[in-house]
């Protein structure tokens, strides 16, 4: 995906100004959107003209601070934050309804929220397994189901799942996380087929349609890696053909590309952003 001529920001640079209009007039809901990759996706959406709703689960003070900073950096983007437990079906439906009520529409859903509870198979508890599956996989289903109903009423929309390279390769001590992230591939492809079928039945002819795709980040420089010892990080880098960790902005650029109107012929696909870790 080449950088556009109007977008001088490199893949690893953050910008606090509008750099394009690919998403002008669109509303994007990004779960887990107040930090890490989610926050980078929110910024990338705003730089392309979208209004942004960021979901979060716990720290209200931090979320409000994020919203305040975001509004200062992107004054043209209407920002809102929405608290909810992604593992709770009612919370998922409520937050989607809140976004639509606040912004009047929902064009883009990014299922980014996720948790880990790492243990080897023999040491994993029922709660460790259930909670990670509930948040990382079931939550994406509940949110997508609610968003899809609204998108079908309008005949267009974009859903992007943030999976993980671990869903493709597996990971020692991460059987719950790997299973949930791999499950997103089946969810992506089935939703993509069903959405396309429903849009065709409606006779929509504008060409935008509803697409569903997945992005699989590799090891990315976020808060989740801050506590990892340097020796371990060095070992991780040695396994990556490009020899470095990814930047959140590199994932975000692929997400906003998939969310654009011009990507209407891409659906049911899995996009790796992992430095060649899995080929």
Image (cartoon, rainbow, N blue to C red):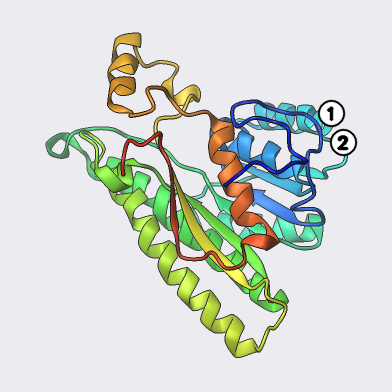
Query: Residue 274: x percent and y percent?
Result: 40, 37
Q: Which residue was labeled with disc 2? A: 75
Q: Residue furthest top?
A: 230
Say the numbered circle drawn on residue 276.
Answer: none
Residue at 26 percent of width and 37 percent of height: 174
Quadrant, the C terminus: top left
Residue 127 drawn at (x, y percent) = 29, 43
- Picture layout, residue 275 above or below residue 196: above
Relative vertical location of residue 122 with respect to residue 22 in this rendering, above or below: above
Determine whether, in the image, residue 83 is placed left or right of residue 172: right
Mark 1 — residue? Answer: 72
Judge left or right: residue 99 versus residue 227.
right
Q: Residue at x 39, y 43 (%)?
A: 164
Element class at badge 1:
helix
Badge 1: few (under 14), some or many (20 or more) residues near its Cα, within 10 Å? few
Give the answer, above or below, for where 269 lies relative to 63.
below
- The part of the image, by quadrant, that contains residue 58 is top right
Can residue 257 be seen in the rendering of this structure?
yes
Can you give x and y, in whole percent of width and height, for residue 13 in the image?
Answer: 65, 25
Question: How far apart in space, not on screen, are marks 1 and 2 (Cα)?
Answer: 6 Å
Q: Position of residue 91 (x, y in %)?
A: 57, 54
């Amino acid at each position: 995906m080449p950088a556009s001529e109007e977008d001088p920001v490199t893949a690893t640079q953050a910008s606090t100004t509008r750099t394009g209009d690919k998403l002008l007039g669109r509303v994007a809901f990004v779960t887990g959107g107040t930090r890490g990759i989610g926050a980078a996706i929110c910024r990338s959406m705003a730089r392309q003209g979208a209004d942004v709703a960021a979901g979060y689960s716990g720290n209200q003070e931090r979320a409000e601070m994020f919203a305040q900073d975001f509004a200062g950096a992107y004054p043209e983007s209407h920002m809102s934050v929405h608290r909810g437990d992604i593992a709770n079906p009612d919370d998922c439906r409520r937050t989607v309804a809140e976004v639509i009520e606040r912004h009047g529409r929902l064009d883009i859903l990014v299922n980014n929220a996720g948790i880990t509870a790492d243990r080897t198979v023999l040491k994993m508890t029922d709660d460790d397994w259930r909670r990670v599956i509930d948040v990382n996989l079931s939550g994406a289903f509940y949110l997508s189901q609610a968003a899809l109903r609204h998108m079908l009423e309008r005949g267009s929309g974009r859903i992007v799942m943030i999976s993980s390279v671990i869903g493709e390769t597996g990971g020692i001590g991460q059987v719950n996380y790997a299973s949930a992230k791999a499950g997103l591939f089946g969810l992506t492809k089935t939703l993509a087929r069903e959405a396309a079928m429903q849009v065709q039945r409606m006779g929509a002819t504008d060409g935008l349609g509803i697409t569903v795709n997945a992005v699989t980040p590799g090891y990315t420089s976020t808060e989740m890696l801050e506590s990892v010892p340097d020796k371990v990080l060095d070992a991780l880098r040695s396994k990556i053909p490009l020899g470095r960790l990814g930047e959140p902005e590199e994932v975000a650029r692929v997400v906003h590309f998939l969310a654009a109107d011009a990507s209407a012929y891409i659906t049911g696909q899995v996009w790796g952003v992992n430095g060649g870790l899995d080929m």
